[in-house]
Image (cartoon, rainbow, N blue to C red):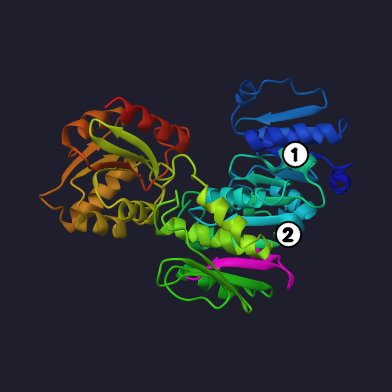
Amino acid sequence: MYKQLVEILHGKKILILGFGREGISSYKFIRKILPEISLTIADKDKNVLNNIDFILDDNCQTILGKSYISYLDNFDLIIKTPGIPNNLLKDKVSQNKITSQTDLFLQLFSLNTIGVTGTKGKSTTSSLIRHILSYYHKDVVLIGNIGVPPFDMIEKIGKETRVVFELSSYQLENISVSPHIAVILNLFQEHLDHYENFDGYQSAKFNITKFQTKNDWVIFNADDPSVNEMIAKSGFTGESLEFSSEKEINAGAFLNREGNIVFKQNKNISEFDFNNRLYLPGRHNLMNIMAAVCACKLLEIPDNIISEAISGFKGLEHRLEYIGKFGNIHFYNDSIATVPEATIEAVKTLKTVDTLILGGKDRGIDYSKLARFINQSDITNLIFTGEAGKRILEEVEAIGISNKKKYFLITRFDKIKQIIKQYTKPGYICLLSPAASSYDMFKNFEERGEAFKKIARNI
């Protein structure tokens, strides 16, 4: 199936730009299918090769350190790692030379692919779709932003393989083909340290439908104004399904008065009554479930299979994850919450939050709505971390912080332990839902979540 990829790459001077997980994957796969081709690796980290457990072959050159993007025009094709902003390359190389694993993969397998994007819920929804499909199809793979580079799975994909592809805005930046089924969950302010503005972020996200045809499908959140606006602007000509927790939908999924999920398409109606058999709490997860139902109904998965699979899906780590009860305090880990909207939804879902841990790296996100919500909430203890935490606190103070609330601004994450232990009311919840990225104190949100879980278990 990847002979077409050999044809695309053969005879070209190729640069692998960025040598993290995906760059390493590109190197290994290209070496496997084209062992003699000359490759060059470029990365701003001059010590990046210290992180690999293999030796580069003699037919591979490197450009490491500050000059890593100085010679881009010397190459015929640049396979870019998603995290490198396009703005860095804008005046240095023709954009038609830039591609990515995502783009090359979709050129081969777009018809097999259900692509899932959105600011929040991508991993949960992608994993849930894969979980449902695997009850019915033996040949299902999950790739992308979930942590599996596309090239790592490419040899396992055949004509009948169902591919669930979690797609970040970074991965969507340089595509020339869209997936056959595109799922758009929501759009909030995010990654404003990577894009010039929110419009740039939205535009990257909507590449997921940009190259679709009249035979393709988009599944989108009918309750999200930004998503609806972008759909209207996109000139999309294919078929669509919507999902909503607020209104009845003519084609797609919605909640009825009993709180059951109803799916309608043409004259076909299905109703899913989970009767408190869901492991995924909150309205935001109902939206994720409805998106997954729409995708699986398009693929003609029987209702009983969909219902059984969803009932058995226990969710993912670091996503409103219940850690347990320690020191008579209930602990929830929502480290994945890197935007205010996710934190607000988490607090609304759990209801009895007494201590909330916020903050991290400041990326210029608007925190005014979160500040108002915090001030009006019943949360007693607020712990603010990092530059984002400092800014959220400033927003809360500007409104006029309630004298019923205690707040703490800390510079070291381990300092939260004593505060939690001393001030959280017995029987109530301590929630980590930062509304900010983790990169100031941690390698990623997973490391932050693990640090919190360790603290919780030692209360």
Seen in the image, is 38 located left or right of residue 292?
right
Residue pictured at 73% horizontal, 20% vertical:
55
Front-most of 453 and 73? 453
SS label for mark 2: loop
| Viewer-side label of 2, 1 | 2
Give the labeled residue for mark 1: 15
Residue pictured at 16% horizontal, 36% vertical:
423
Dot 1 amino acid type: Leu
The stretch of residues the image draws in magenta is: 208-222
Give the labeled residue for mark 2: 177
Front-most of 233 and 153? 153
Dot 2 amino acid type: Val
Compared with residue 327, is residue 388 higher up or lower down, i.e. above or below? below
The image shows residue 421 at horizontal and vertical percentages of 21, 31
The image shows residue 251 at horizontal and vertical percentages of 58, 75
Seen in the image, is 127 located left or right of residue 157?
left
Compared with residue 451, is residue 154 higher up or lower down, i.e. above or below? below
The image shows residue 364 at horizontal and vertical percentages of 39, 52
Badge 2: few (under 14), some or many (20 or more) residues near its Cα, within 10 Å? many
SS label for mark 1: strand
Q: CA distance from mark 2 to mark 1?
A: 21 Å
The picture quadrant where one finds residue 149 is top right
Compared with residue 51, is residue 91 higher up or lower down, i.e. above or below? below
The image shows residue 85 at horizontal and vertical percentages of 58, 48
Which of the numbered marks, if any, corresponds to residue 286? none
